[in-house]
C-alpha cells in the first residue's frame, strides 16, 4: 500500500515529548509553546505567532483579531475547505464567494472587485495545495477599499510569492499543523501577524478573553483554543527540519510533473513565474475527454493499493451551507469541474521516486483502458 500521506517524526519529537512528561509541563502552560511560536513566526518572517489547537480555530481567531463582526462580508474562494466559511459564520459574518483560476486552482483575483459591497470587511485568499494566490492584486484591492487580508496558509509552509513567504503577505494569516500538513503537531494551528494590536486580540480570543487586569471578568466572548506543550514539543522538533521537508516536497513534486507530462488527459497545477510552490499535495485533474471522473479513478487506484483523496467540494454546493440560505443560485464552473475531476495522489514525505513511477504508471494504464 502506498499511503496518501505520512508524517516524518524521526527527529527530536520523542525526546522533546519525554521532556514534557518528565517535567510535568503537559498543558498549554509550558516553555515549548512560546518557543514554537517564536521559531515559526521568525521562519515566516512575521512579528508575532499565536499557537492554537487546530487550523480551523486559527482562522476563527484571525477573524476575531481582524475585528470581523455580525453582518460583515468576507470574500473567499468557492474552492476551499469548509473551515473558512464556518469560521466566518461563527463571527456572525457572511462568506461571499469567487471562483478559482483553472490553472492554479487558487482564487480568481479578477472576480474580487465585483463582489465588494458596503459590508465587505475582509478578503480571505486561500493558498491552494502548496501554490500561492496572486497576492499583488489582492493587496491593491484591499488598499483601495480599506479591507483586511486574512491569508489561509494551512497548505503552504515555506511557499513563496515573489520571494516573500506566504503567510507574511496579508495583514494576518492562519496555519494548520494537522498530521498531513508540511510540518505537524498532530492537531494544531497558529495565527501570524506583524500587527501588535491584532496579536493581542488573537491571544485573548484563544484564552477565553481573560483580561490581564482582572482575570475572571470578561468583556468579549472567547474560546479555549490553546495549544498544549505536548503539541508544541512536536512542532519544535519539526521546525528543525522544515527546510529539508520543503526541499523533499519540491523534489518529489518536480519528479511527479516530469512523469505526468507524458500522460494524455491529465493536467496538474502550474507553477506561476512569481510562485515557489511547495507541492503540499500532488494533484491531478482528469480531462473531460477521458470519460473518467475522480471517484472512479480513486476506486481503481485503491484496488491497486494506491491511496488518494478527493478534492474539496465547492462551498456553494455544501448542503449544510445551502440549508442556512447561503449562495442561492450561485454557480462557479471551475470549482464545479475540478471538484469532480480532481484528486490527489500519494504525497507523503517518505514517498520514493520508485513509488511515484508505480503511481504514475497505474494512472496511465487505467486511462489507456478507457480510451
Ligand atoms: C487543513 C486546512 C485547514 C484546517 O486545518 P485543521 O487543522 O484541520 O482545522 C484550513 N484551511 C485549509 C486550506 C486547510 O488545508
Image: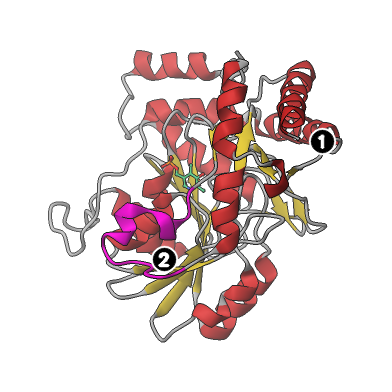
User: Depth-wise, is mark 2 or mark 1 nearer the camera?
Assistant: 1
The magenta stretch spans residue 329 = yes
**The quarter of the displayed image where residue 274 is located:** bottom right
Q: Residue at x 61, y 43 (%)?
A: 342
Circle 2: element type: helix
Q: Is residue 218 above or below residue 341?
A: below
Is 363 magenta? The answer is no
Q: Residue furthest left?
A: 216
Q: Please tell me which residue lies in front, 314 or 293.
A: 293
Q: Kindly report the distance in space between the C-alpha atoms of the residues bearing marks 2 and 1.
A: 51 Å
Asked if the residue at tag 1 contacts the one at tag 2, i.e. Cβ–Cβ closer than 8 Å, the answer is no
Q: Which residue is mark 1?
A: 263
The residue range painted magenta reads 313-330
Q: Position of residue 356 (x, y in %)?
A: 75, 23
User: In this rendering, does residue 47 appear at all?
Assistant: no
Badge 2 is on which residue?
197
- The image quarter in which residue 268 lies: top right
Q: Residue at x 63, y 52 (%)?
A: 45
Q: Crowdedness of circle 1 by 10 Å Cα count: few (<14), some, many (20+)?
A: some
Classify 71 as above or below 87. below
- Residue at the image position 42 percent from the left and 63 percent from the top: 198
Compare residues 363 and 61 and report the one nearer the observer. 363
Horizontal side, residue 181 vs residue 219: left or right: right
Number of numbered tags placed on the structure image: 2
- Find residue 255 and report its horizontal and vertical position in percent: 82, 31
Amino acid at each position: 500500500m502506498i499511503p496518501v500521506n505520512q508524517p516524518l517524526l524521526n527527529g527530536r519529537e520523542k525526546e522533546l515529548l519525554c521532556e514534557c512528561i518528565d517535567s510535568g509541563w503537559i498543558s498549554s502552560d509550558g516553555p515549548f509553546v512560546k518557543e514554537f511560536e517564536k521559531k515559526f513566526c521568525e521562519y515566516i518572517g512575521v512579528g508575532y505567532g499565536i499557537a492554537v489547537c487546530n487550523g480551523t480555530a486559527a482562522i476563527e481567531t484571525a477573524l476575531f483579531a481582524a475585528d470581523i463582526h455580525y453582518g460583515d462580508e468576507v470574500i473567499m474562494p468557492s474552492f476551499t475547505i469548509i473551515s473558512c466559511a464556518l469560521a466566518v459564520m461563527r463571527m456572525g459574518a457572511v462568506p461571499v464567494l469567487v471562483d478559482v483560476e483553472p490553472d492554479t486552482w487558487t482564487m480568481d483575483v479578477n472576480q474580487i472587485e465585483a463582489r465588494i459591497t458596503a459590508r465587505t470587511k475582509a478578503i480571505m485568499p486561500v493558498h491552494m495545495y502548496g501554490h500561492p494566490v496572486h497576492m499583488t492584486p489582492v493587496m491593491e484591492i484591499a488598499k483601495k477599499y480599506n479591507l483586511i487580508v486574512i491569508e489561509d496558509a494551512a497548505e503552504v509552509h515555506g511557499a513563496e510569492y515573489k520571494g516573500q513567504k506566504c503567510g507574511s503577505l496579508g495583514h494576518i494569516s492562519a496555519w494548520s499543523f494537522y498530521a498531513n500538513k508540511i510540518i505537524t503537531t498532530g492537531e494544531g494551528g497558529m495565527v501570524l501577524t506583524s500587527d501588535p494590536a491584532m496579536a493581542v486580540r488573537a491571544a485573548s480570543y484563544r484564552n477565553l478573553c481573560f483580561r490581564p487586569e482582572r482575570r475572571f471578568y470578561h468583556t468579549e466572548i472567547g474560546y479555549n483554543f490553546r495549544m498544549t506543550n505536548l503539541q508544541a514539543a512536536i512542532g519544535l522538533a519539526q521546525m528543525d527540519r522544515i527546510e529539508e521537508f520543503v526541499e523533499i516536497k519540491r523534489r518529489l513534486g518536480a519528479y511527479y510533473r516530469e512523469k505526468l507530462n507524458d500522460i494524455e488527459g491529465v493536467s496538474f497545477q502550474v507553477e506561476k513565474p512569481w510562485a515557489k510552490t511547495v507541492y503540499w499535495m500532488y494533484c491531478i485533474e482528469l480531462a473531460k475527454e477521458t470519460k473518467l471522473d475522480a471517484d472512479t479513478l480513486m476506486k481503481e487506484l485503491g484496488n491497486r493499493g494506491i491511496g488518494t483523496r478527493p478534492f474539496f467540494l465547492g462551498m456553494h454546493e455544501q448542503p449544510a451551507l445551502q440549508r442556512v440560505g447561503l449562495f442561492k443560485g450561485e454557480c462557479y464552473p471551475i470549482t464545479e469541474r475540478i471538484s469532480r475531476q480532481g484528486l490527489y495522489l500519494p504525497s507523503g514525505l517518505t514517498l520514493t521516486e520508485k513509488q511515484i513511477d508505480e503511481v504514475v504508471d497505474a494512472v496511465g494504464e487505467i486511462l489507456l483502458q478507457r480510451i
